[in-house]
């Protein structure tokens, strides 16, 4: 991964966190790392714990950033969420997965933000 790509990802995650806060979410943690991967954002939406995957792109040439959350990535997100819940002793907490796609389509234009709540279809 190039430094520029990593910078784009970090910029997208920061924008996603600000967006979520503006929507009334409380950010609990960002960039939570485990051996198997990383959870981009862990937030609180009222009583619900939300694991947020952020996908950032420079264009839609290869599709929406949301399309990159394929079945393999979904399985990985479930595993990371279980690890997070276990490590924080949060057994029985109601939680869900959201995906935020951010696309910077043109320089000088605001990014397009797409937020899919409960993106994996059911709660953990």
Image: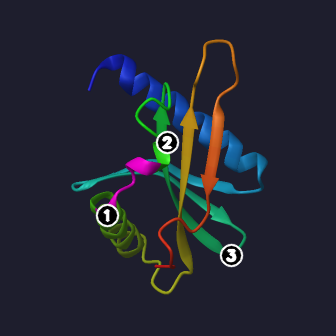
Give the CA distance from mark 2 to mark 3. 30 Å
Where residue 71 sits, quadrant-wise, is: bottom left
Q: How many marks?
A: 3
Residue at screen point 65% across, 29% down: 111
Image depth: mark 1 or mark 3 in front: 1
Residue at the disc numbered 1: 71
Give the CA distance from mark 1 to mark 3. 27 Å
How many C-alpha atoms fall within 10 Å of the one at disc 2: few (<14), some, or many (≥20)?
A: some
Residue at the disc numbered 2: 64
Which segment did they paint magenta?
Answer: 67-71
Tell me the number on the disc at residue 84: none
Q: Tell me whether the residue at label 1 lies in contact with that at label 3, contact meaning CB atoms closer than 8 angstroms.
A: no
Of marks 1 and 2, which one's residue comes earlier in the chain? 2
SS under mark 3:
loop
Of marks 1 and 3, which one's residue comes earlier in the chain? 3
Camera-side residue of 12 and 91: 12
Give the CA distance from mark 1 to mark 2. 16 Å
Residue at the disc numbered 3: 47
Query: Which percent across, then down, holds residue 19?
Result: 70, 43
Query: Which percent across, then down, holds residue 6?
Result: 38, 26
């Amino acid at each position: 991964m190039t430094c520029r790509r990593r910078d784009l990802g970090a910029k997208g995650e920061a924008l996603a966190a600000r967006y979520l806060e503006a929507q009334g979410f409380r950010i609990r943690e960002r960039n939570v790392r485990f051996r198997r991967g990383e959870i981009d954002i862990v937030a609180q939406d009222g009583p619900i714990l939300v694991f947020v995957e952020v996908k950032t792109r420079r264009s839609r040439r290869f599709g929406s950033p949301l399309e990159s959350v394929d079945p393999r990535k979904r399985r990985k997100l479930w595993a990371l969420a279980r690890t997070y819940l276990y490590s924080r002793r949060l057994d029985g907490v109601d939680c869900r997965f959201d995906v935020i796609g951010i696309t910077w389509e043109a320089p000088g234009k605001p990014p397009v933000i797409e937020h899919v709540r409960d993106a994996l279809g059911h709660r953990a």
